[in-house]
Image: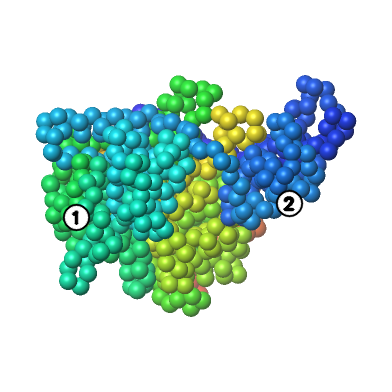
Amino acid sequence: MMSKTIEQILAPKPEARPHIYAYSIADEAHKGLLKVGQTTRNVKQRVAEQLKTAAIKNYTIELDEPAEREAGAIFSDHEVRTALIRKGFENTVLEWVRCSVKDVKTVLTQLRIGQRFTGTHHETFTMRREQAEAVDRTHAYFHSIWKEDVHAVPRFLWNAKMRFGKTFTTYQLAKKLGAKRVLVVTFKPAVEDAWQTDLESHVDFDGWQFLSRNSDQNPTDINRQKPVVYFSSFQDLLGRDEAGNIKPKNEWIHTVNWDLVVFDEYHFGAWRETAKELFEGEEEAVAKKETKLEYTTGLEDVNKNLSELSETETEFLPITTKAYLYLSGTPFRALATGEFIEEQLFNWTYTDEQRAREEFGANSPGKWDPYGALPQMRLLTYQMPDELLAIARAGEFDEFDLNEFFEASGRGAKAKFKHKSDVQKWLDIIRGGYTSQVIEHLKTGTRPPFPYSDVRLLPYLQHSFWFLPNVAACHAMANLLAEKHNTFWHDYQVVVAAGASAGIGLEALPPVRKAIGSGFETKTVTLSCGKLITGVTVPQWSSILMLRNLKSPETYFQSAFRVQSAWSIRNPNGDNPNEEEILKPVCFVFDFAPTRALRQLSEYGIGLSPNELNPENAVKDLVSFLPVLAYDGANMTQIDAGGILDIAMAGTSATLLARKWESALLVNVDNDTLRRILDNPEAMAAVERIEGWRALGDNIIETIINKSEKVKELKNKAKDRDLTEKEKKQLTEEERSTSPNASSSRRN
């Protein structure tokens, strides 16, 4: 039994926007003072509520401005007051500051352009339940091995999705182990900042030292009485000089007896395939640079040595340590091949995260929810019309080939799609304006939730990510969206994050952030074929359109999770640290190759539960927190785990097949029915509220009736005598214009 209705799955997006306000009170006690606060509600209403109990009426709201930085982040009233205090203004009591409105506006301007004012205090948050469990289980396992053999070197794997807090939790493990020498080795050097920030901002690690190749400090000159963390990449550690010897700068690493070695972002031999698939749409030279930046060089040799882990770490990385900790988000290969037994493994998956979110909300009302801002994903799949499927069919189930459909050539302004007119139809479909479908939906009496037409979905598409096959397709899409007739899309700023011109790695991010800004008033579409899929967080992205073929579930969900980042405002009204305004409670994945998408989903669910003998149970657990809606050309239906496996293996499910046979599309709507709609003001008003119907033009029902009457007249003539060639041609044309199916067959 599925727990959510379609209405619940497509719940409206909350509307909230943080504001900084300041007000004064006209009396001697408050002379020269301003109360500086924040809220996501109406400022007038908020201030009136504050002063109501004291019956204060002689107040003036002096300032009401958005609390947003130019780069899109949000600042708080605490930061504003801290900035004022740093400038020498007196914070007399609580939120009152002795300053002028001009002074507050100056600080707001400084905060907006990126000048940060942080306090001297450190973070004091404690571990979440699952983080403490990971630490306790790993600690217990290490000691159980050392109890049997004091010289043994145990290994443990944390299979944890994004936002588990792996850096903070790793440091807590090191602290519990009493580790003084910790070496962090990564396949992705770009994560260094996160490792350094977590160590240097939390009171639990006060006095700890962080070093890397980017540090000014000589690692041999460190305080040996205090714990030290050294961060390095495999590229660095595996580097050799011309004679094949360890580079002099790294010799010290091999002489230290490490207490813990951490392998971060490890995907267990799948790097070559993952990198190839992720960047295969990029230009060859760019793909090489992106791959090098993303995964570092020298990985092919590392993969050979690590394809079967057993106990070979010291063979490729000659260092000594007491224990190894592996961190990964998608270690399917290691799980499937049993490289780690159950006692060596801690799992924290999307399903675990969402279950914790649900349980915390139910069991701890009123407390700040550490999981509350993590959006729940929804997968919506759409079966394309036969006339578009005919353009690009491929695979075992004759499914929609996205790469073929969106095939393009050229660069920049000269880029265009091979099937441009059909891609234009697809654009019309996703905004509910495709003529044939509008007529079919009028017949069925339903209006499926197409991405850019359903009012419940549109707010989540204010900032979206479109994942296309290659650079040419990205440029071609930008050109098509900009054409004069596509007026709907002109409200969106389109950012092409593809090709050499977009930059390498994080260089592609600033144009996206600039286009989005705070995200409240802008609309954007980011076009990519691999860039910005990993290592970045753009809170405003709330949906991703999968417009390319992806083979591996790792790459598919790595891409999908890019839009699952939290977007919220802590303490929105400045008076309750346990309150959090959630701006993105859910996020969406839209896919237009249903069979392939659901196969990815089923493989992902099964891959995360290698010990589950029944695949339906594995998938059921996942879809209980990742609802799936499938549009089969007639109906939008929620699909359960059994249906997902049916579609993944056979291309359809019993439920969808039954719904198809029940479809109202098999019932003809005659002219009398259309006339009754035309004569009924309420019925016509309902029809005209449908955006796609309005797009067909004025007097469309009269046109359909007139044309069908003409067809009937010509057919009656044909019974009495042979039609002239002109009449035959007229009959053919009229039949085509009144029949969606005839229209489809003509296009095919």
Q: Nearer the viewer, residue 234 or 146?
A: 146
Indicate the amino acid at tag 2: Thr
Q: Nearer the viewer, residue 699 or 352?
A: 352
Residue 314 seen in render: yes
Estimate the x, y position of residue 735 in percent, counting from the top left. Answer: 48, 62
Q: Label 2: how many residues lie within 10 Å, few (<14), some (14-19) or many (20+)?
A: few
Q: Which residue occupies 52% across, 29% down?
A: 368
Q: Which mark is residue 269?
A: none
Give the left or right position of residue 89, taking residue 676 as reference: right
Quadrant in which the N terminus is drawn? top left
Residue position for label 1: 317
Tell me if label 2 and label 1 are in contact, CB under 8 Å.
Answer: no
Q: Which residue occupies 60% across, 70% down?
A: 484
Residue position for label 2: 106
Quadrant in which the C terminus is drawn? bottom left
Element carrying mark 2? helix
Q: How far apart are the alpha carbons under marks 2 and 1?
A: 54 Å
Residue 549 seen in render: no
Mark with earlier residue (2, 1): 2
Estimate the x, y position of residue 376 in percent, counting from the top left. Answer: 44, 39
Q: Label 1: how many residues lie within 10 Å, few (<14), some (14-19) or many (20+)?
A: some
Q: Nearer the viewer, residue 285 or 477?
A: 285
Q: Nearer the viewer, residue 55 or 672?
A: 55
Write down the quadrant of residue 456 in the picture.
top right
